[in-house]
Amino acid sequence: MSIEIDILNGDASWPIAEPLFKAVYPRDVVEKLPWGHIKWANPDLRVLIAEPSGGLASHVGIYFRTITWNGHKMHVGGIGGVCTREDCRGRGYATLALEAATQTMRANEAARFALLFCEPHNFPFYQARNWHPFTGEVYAEQPEGRILFDHTAPFVFDLGRAPRQGTIDLCGLPW
Ligand SMILES: CC(C)(COP(=O)(O)OP(=O)(O)OC[C@H]1O[C@@H](n2cnc3c(N)ncnc32)[C@H](O)[C@@H]1OP(=O)(O)O)[C@@H](O)C(=O)NCCC(=O)NCCS
């Protein structure tokens, strides 16, 4: 089946992504999760995969952020909001969208590595796609102040060489 793949401005394309998010992450389910109360950043860009007949099938959010790692400033690319509509899973769409996202970060030469956060049941999915656990600590901002962000687990992807340990400060809201 032919598909369409677009990379669009994050805010402008939210109305396209919103129905998929509501289907994959229903509010009443999310509220009960350990990260249900977290305030998230909005993506700068979105990778959107659509089936011409069936609408939006898969989504990956891209974030650009200057973080610190062990106190050193670094520009990185973030990945968040990875989701595929239930009836479209297993067709390689999330894999394709992740590749498009990391290619976009490569094109943005200043991004040193990519960083995402996920739950344990998705560790094998990302590890099979060359993402590596970051075993250090991650801090982030929330409306109440700076917090240790350990609600989901950090994984890194080598654009250049990504750190595997140490202390990362996201210097803003998490994604
Ligand atoms: C995880 C998710 C994005 C995968 O989307 P997808 O478009 O089906 O992914 P792909 O088709 O590219 O890859 C599917 C492959 O990954 C495997 N896979 C999917 N979820 C997996 C998991 N949690 N652990 C290990 N493998 C997994 C599938 O078995 C399939 O393997 P195959 O190619 O050998 O058949 C999708 O299942 C989803 O939206 N889940 C709910 C939301 C979520 O958990 N998102 C991740 C947030 S970090």
Image (cartoon, rainbow, N blue to C red):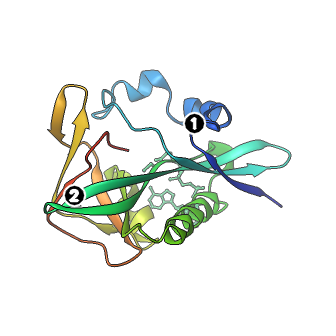
Element type at marker 1? loop
- From the viewer's side, name the closer residue of 55 and 14: 14
The disc at residue 120 is none
Residue 63 image position (x, y, % from top left) = 45, 51
Q: Which residue is mark 1?
A: 11
Residue 15 picture quarter: top right
Residue 161 picture quarter: bottom left
In the rendered view, tell whether residue 4 sits above or below residue 157: above
Element type at marker 2? strand
Residue at 27% in and 34% down = 34
Residue 26 image position (x, y, % from top left) = 50, 27
Residue 66 image position (x, y, % from top left) = 32, 55
99 horizontally vs 28: left or right: right
Of the numbered discs 1 and 2, the one sitting upstream in the chain is: 1
Amino acid at pointer 1: Asp
Residue at 60% in and 64% down = 100
- From the viewer's side, name the closer residue of 3 and 64: 64
In the rendered view, tell whether residue 95 sits above or below residue 56: below
The disc at residue 68 is 2
- From the viewer's side, name the closer residue of 110 and 10: 110
